[in-house]
Amino acid sequence: MNDLHIVSAKWLHENLHDPQVVVVDCRFSLMDIELGRKLYQEKHIEGAYYLDLNLDLSSSVQKHGGRHPLPDFDKLAKKLSQIGVNSSETMVVVYDDSRFAFASRLWWLLRYMGHEQVAVLDGGFAGWQSLNYSVSSEVPQQRVGKFTPQLQTEWVVDIETVKARKDLPEVVLIDSREGDRYRGEREPIDPIAGHIEGAVNYPWMEVTNEQGFVIENQGDRWQDVKNAQEAIVYCGSGVTACVNLLSLKLAGIETCRLYAGSWSDWCSYLV
């Protein structure tokens, strides 16, 4: 099962009660940080657990390091154990209602922690509901699992590595934000508008259609990138960059690293 990175609602429906499958709801709103949990409590895929972008999938914000620093991996591993995830065994299916924006963060984090058995639900929660599959407001009980992280530390770069490598001919630096933010025409969150010099723009929302289903032939997006020896991917805070990392994985492009602090870290040194 570990060659799956995207699963359909039909696949999940057929495997929902498999004891080796754990479902995680990642719904979140940057503008209303309580909204995702409220939506989960109202209704979610039957048996799904909830993990919060700020509380579970990130650590506390410091002066530098960006708006969503990578989480404390021991704490996250403990949480994963409590929802029944066993390292290298359990298939984890993650979903949101934001075109993979938050689910991809957990998809990437699990793989960064050495757990390849993880997939994003195509179409998200809306796609699931459109087929009238079972939803529930019941929060499932904790389970017993054993999750031991094995961090792929070479998958992450910091600001010094970006500075040192971004202009090398064999490296491509990818900005995953919307085009107007990349161009500096709009900046709703960070104190400075613009992008890291030398970056090319591949907006994360191009990975899916408006209904949140992955667009076929992701390799077509990356024709200009596929011959690079290394891709460094960033966004505003290291979250939606993971949608592009998923897309690159679907395209078969392997040597990809996340600038976890992203633009919010980069511009923290400029203000």
Image: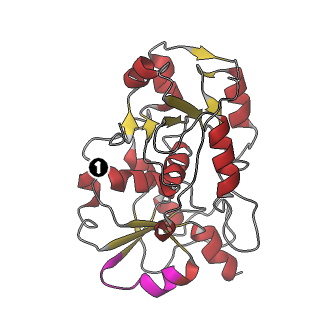
Instruction: Quadrant for the N terminus, please.
Output: top left
Q: Is residue 71 visible?
A: no
In percent of the image, x 63 and y 40: which residue is there? 81
Is 83 a magenta residue? no
Name the spot of residue 5 as percent of width and height, x first.
38, 42
Observer-nearest residue: 40 or 204? Answer: 40
Using residue 228 as the reference point, say whether residue 257 is left or right of it: right
Q: Which SS class for mark 1?
A: helix
In percent of the image, x 68 and y 28: which residue is there? 39
Name the spot of residue 140 as percent of width and height, x first.
68, 23
Q: State whether residue 116 is above or below residue 84.
A: below
Quarter location, residue 193: bottom right
Is 163 a magenta residue? yes
Amino acid type, label 1:
Gln
Q: State whether residue 8 is above or below residue 109.
A: above
Q: State whether residue 10 is above or below residue 154.
A: above
In the image, which residues are magenta?
A: 161-171
Using residue 13 as the reference point, say whether residue 54 is left or right of it: right
Q: Give the labeled residue for mark 1.
A: 218
Observer-nearest residue: 61 or 147? Answer: 147
Q: Is residue 250 visible?
A: yes
Q: State whether residue 127 is above or below residue 122.
A: above
In percent of the image, x 47 and y 66: which residue is there? 155
